[in-house]
Image (cartoon, rainbow, N blue to C red):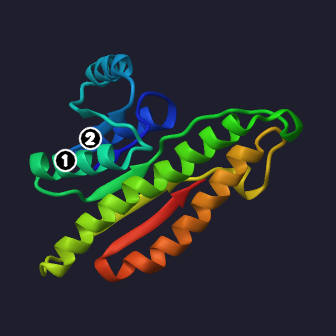
């Protein structure tokens, strides 16, 4: 199981819970200092994590990570897209950079790992394997109901909800189930 955004919060808790449940868990972080904190949190929880550095917005970094995971563990069975950032600001005060950063991390950061995982699963399916893959995306009530000061975050999370519905229809033929948590 590959989980993005594991340096804190929901991602960290998900990585530890998955490892405690017996899943081989690959946790990703962008900042090497956060990898140290992640390793310490895993040790305190009594679990082993395969921790990999990953820039969630860089396709080459993600492709290399998926290839590395499949080489080390034989295959990828599940991807949890959890990476995210906040740049809360009312629309009239929001800068284009704040808008772009949130959209890039949430939408591209969901698309890019999903793309490479889906390619892996499709290749396995076309090779005749029975694939039972899981793609789990993290959305938010802010994207469903809205929240003042979060037009960028809400738009990104609404996009992830739509992405989930569409990719579920596209990937079902390969044995992939796609869901979102909000």
Name the mark on residue 97: none
Q: Is residue 157 left or right of residue 115?
A: right
The residue drawn where x is 64% and y is 42% is 100
- In the figure, is residue 182 to the left or right of 120? right
Q: Residue 157: horizontal and vertical position, in percent?
A: 64, 53
The reply to whether discs 2 and 1 touch (Cβ–Cβ < 8 Å) is: yes
Q: What residue is rendered at 35% in x and 38% in y?
A: 15
Q: Earlier in the sequence, mark 2 or mark 1?
A: 2
Image quarter of residue 97: top right
Query: Which labelled disc corresponds to residue 69?
Result: 1
Query: Looking at the image, can residue 23 be seen?
Result: no
Q: Position of residue 38 (x, y in %)?
A: 34, 23
Q: Residue at x 50, y 37 (%)?
A: 10
Residue 79 placement: quadrant: bottom left
Q: Give the side of residue 41 with respect to residue 68, left or right.
A: right
The mark tally for this picture is 2
Label placed on residue 26? 2
**Measured from the top left, where is residue 65 in percent x and y?**
25, 45
Element at badge 2? strand
Residue 45 spot, x, y in % from top left? 31, 24
Label 2 neighbourhood size at 10 Å, few (<14), some (14-19), many (20+)?
many
């Amino acid at each position: 199981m590959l989980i993005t955004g594991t340096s804190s919060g929901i991602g960290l808790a998900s990585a530890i819970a998955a490892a405690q449940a017996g899943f081989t868990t690959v946790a990703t972080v962008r900042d090497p200092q956060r990898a140290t904190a992640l390793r310490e949190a895993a040790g305190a929880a009594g679990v082993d994590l395969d921790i990999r550095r990953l820039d969630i917005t860089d396709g080459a970094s993600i492709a290399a990570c998926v290839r590395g995971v499949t080489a080390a563990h034989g295959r990828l069975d599940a991807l949890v897209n959890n990476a995210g950032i906040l740049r809360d600001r009312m629309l009239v005060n929001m800068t284009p950079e704040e808008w772009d950063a949130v959209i890039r991390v949430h939408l591209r950061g969901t698309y890019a790992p999903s793309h490479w995982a889906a390619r892996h699963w499709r290749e396995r399916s076309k090779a005749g394997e029975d694939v039972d893959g899981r793609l789990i995306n993290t959305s938010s009530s802010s994207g469903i109901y809205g929240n003042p000061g979060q037009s960028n975050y809400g738009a990104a999370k609404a996009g992830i909800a739509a992405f989930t519905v569409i990719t579920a229809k596209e990937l079902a033929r390969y044995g992939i189930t796609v869901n979102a948590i909000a």
